[in-house]
Image: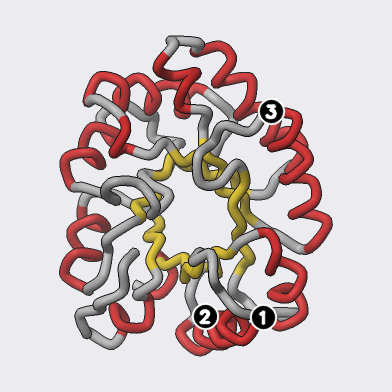
């Protein structure tokens, strides 16, 4: 279970001390990564130096409406500061407007600047119809991205079983799934893993590992 978890802290009022604790917890529990805002990447890189958890950060977060050039700059800056993985939010307006080529181009442009580092594409399922979710799953699968991710944690709701099934049915075997938002206990985590999810974005990683039910909001 440990290596499925991206130990997440993306609250807007996060303090330095909380990031340091997050990193220590990630080391203690051997989580796959810490997922944090770009502001804290450099700090995390000093705390986690020579440690196994990766540093994941978010770009275009949480709305995805930045220009591609801005997202590219964010991605480059994050990598320079020590990020190992990038979770980017798609421009949902492009999907709603059926500008599919622009979506693929943006994803691929970001992947190009981060090289062999992992790119996860956040599609914010709470804003999509089933048909749109199926389409963006196909688009992400056809792009150079490594993962499709359900949610930012700041939408109307996070991951759902139904959404993950739609994603799974519309991606190739080479595209992985990250479920995030609302995963607060081990039973829920296991349900997503049984569906084929490869990563879980959660702020409740410690509680999940310890078999507790978390009351955290995302």
* Residue ID at (34%, 72%): 1
Residue named by callout 3: 68
**In terms of image quadrants, where is residue 80?**
bottom right
Mark 1 lies on a secondary structure that is loop
Task: Give how far apart the Cα atoms at labels 2 and 1 are.
Answer: 10 Å
Question: Where residue 158 sits: x, y (%)?
Answer: 29, 51
Residue on which the image places disc 2: 26
Of 50 and 151, nearer the camera is 151
* Residue 59 left/right relative to 211: right
Labels 3 and 1 touching (C-beta < 8 A): no
Q: Is residue 56 above or below residue 47?
A: above
Distance between the alpha carbons at the discs numbered 3 and 1: 32 Å
Camera-side mark, 2 or 1 = 2
**Picture layout, residue 172 above or below residue 6:** above
Residue linked to disc 1: 51
Determine the secondary structure under disc 3: helix
Instruction: Please say if the residues under marks 2 and 1 sit with CB atoms less than 8 Å apart.
Output: yes
């Amino acid at each position: 279970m440990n290596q499925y978890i991206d130990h997440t802290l993306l609250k807007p009022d996060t303090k330095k001390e909380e990031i340091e604790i997050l990193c220590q917890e990630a080391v203690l529990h051997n989580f796959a990564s810490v997922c944090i805002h770009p502001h804290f990447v450099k700090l995390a890189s000093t705390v986690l130096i020579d440690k196994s958890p990766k540093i994941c950060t978010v770009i275009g977060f949480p709305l995805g409406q930045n220009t591609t050039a801005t997202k590219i700059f964010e991605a480059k800056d994050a990598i320079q500061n020590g990020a190992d993985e990038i979770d980017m939010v798609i421009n949902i307006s492009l999907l709603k407007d059926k500008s599919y080529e622009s979506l693929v181009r943006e994803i691929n442009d970001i992947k190009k600047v981060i090289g062999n580092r992992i790119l996860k594409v956040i599609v914010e399922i709470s804003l999509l119809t089933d048909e749109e979710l199926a389409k963006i799953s196909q688009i992400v699968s056809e792009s150079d991205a490594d993962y499709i991710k359900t949610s930012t944690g700041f939408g109307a709701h996070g991951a759902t079983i139904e959404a993950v099934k739609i994603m799974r049915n519309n991606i190739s075997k080479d595209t992985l799934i990250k479920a995030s938002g609302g995963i607060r206990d081990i039973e829920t985590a296991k349900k997503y893993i049984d569906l084929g999810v490869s990563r879980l974005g959660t702020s409740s990683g410690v509680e999940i590992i310890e078999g507790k039910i978390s009351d955290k909001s995302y």
